[in-house]
Amino acid sequence: MLNKRISLIALGMWSATQAMANDQAESKGFVEDSSLKVLLRNAYMNRDYKDGNPDKSEWGQAAIGTFSSGFTQGTVGVGVDAFGLYALNLERSEERSGAQGIDFFKKGDSGQPADDLSKGGAAIKFRLSSTTLTYGDQMPALPVLNYDNSRLLPESYTGTLITSKEIKGLQLDAGRFTAESRKSAEGRDSGGLKSINVLGGSYQFTEQFKAALYASDVEDVLKKQYVNANYVFPIDKDQSLTLDFNGYRTKLEDSYVGENGITGDDNKIWSLAATFITGPHSFTLAHQRSTGDSNLGYAYGGYQKDQGRIGDGGNTIYLANSYWSDFNAEDERSWQLGYGLDFSTFGVPGLSYNVAYVRGDNITTSTSEGGTEREIFNQIKYVVQSGPAKDLSVKLRSSVLRVSQKSSEYNVSGNEVRVFVDYPINIF
């Protein structure tokens, strides 16, 4: 059914005649609008687990090259996107690697993590007016299919994506992807994805109000819907209040539930965050709630070759209370208090600090009810503003997570440290 909807919407996008925008008319050419960028990334993650669980850590150096051509001139423009990825393992520890939540270098059959990784991909793209069709290897960033770029190397997907921006403020997306490249492994289909269809869009109703609706269908796994509403109340020239609502509903396929020993097939999860900004300060209050009968809670990301995983991207969780823990267990309720500080007002542009405290309760597992977890999140980031190292960023992040004993089936206590140094270089 979703396949038919995608086909109809795609036809509508391409046949639109009363377009209000025409990006293709402004094309300067294949070469003139092209760009080549290289991101050098050094990343380290350490998880000091509690309750007798072995500690895990990985460290690596990556080079992420991306090329994006312009579109040829004419009624229908043609272009090419391509990327090349390389990562060198700087730790190479059989004992400390292999944590699902770190996943820099996938372990081989011998139990050893890879010494290095290299892979690439390319896609061809066509543009008519302000509608683009891209076929090939891509890194989609949609609420129901969002590639993970929060580790050493990014994930990627192979398939077709149509994005239309014919009407000002309106974006429509429709796509089908049939392969997933795991961030920690080589090859185009290292994630085990059969196929995923995506459909939806967002609309900027006013300068203050924006909303979005999306849906996805992961073959033989689940169907998912997403809704968002975001409203910004301007108060003064340097003050505002933002209300952000996000919600997902997932329905697991019966065959997937049976094959993986899962209890229940339905989950609904939502979050509502209120962020007050005054000058360099931001204050956030958020509530998140998970309901339904699935013992997976809100299921997303991972790889289908891993039990109980989905394959729709490691960043497919547009929810307020997602840090180390996602606070997405069955029946879980969570509250967040957050604070952010921009140091540019104090003469240090590029420096920022964020802290958050999140507490979840009412967690249900197969053996208990009423479990709890809590997390203290800290992050400091600095971006170089000028000079030879302009745009180089250093990010230090830590989390202290404590999970009650009765919820150990869902999550595990620990202390996490992440250190990321990113240096983007624009070749042209």
Image (cartoon, rainbow, N blue to C red):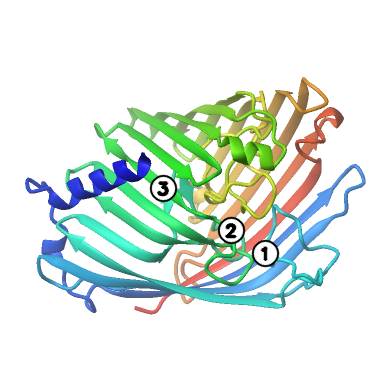
The residue carrying pointer 1 sits among few (fewer than 14), some (14 to 19) or many (20 or more) residues within 10 Å by Cα, namely many
Say which label, 2 or 3, has the lower sequence index. 2
Q: Secondary structure at mark 3?
A: strand
What is the CA distance from the residue labelled 1 to the residue labelled 3?
27 Å
- For image coordinates 73% across by 75% down, the residue present is 90
Tell me which amino acid carries mark 3: Asn
As rendered, which of 119 and 243 lies closer to the eye? 119
Q: Secondary structure at mark 1?
A: loop
The quarter of the displayed image where residue 207 is located: top left
The quarter of the displayed image where residue 203 is located: top left
The quarter of the displayed image where residue 354 is located: top right
What is the CA distance from the residue labelled 2 to the residue labelled 1?
18 Å
Number of numbered discs present?
3
The picture places residue 245, in percent across and down from the top left corner, at 45, 28
Please identify, in this view, whether the residue under mark 1 or under mark 3 is nearer the observer. Answer: 3
Tell me which amino acid carries mark 1: Phe
Where is mark 3, residue-wise?
Answer: 197
The residue carrying pointer 2 sits among few (fewer than 14), some (14 to 19) or many (20 or more) residues within 10 Å by Cα, namely some
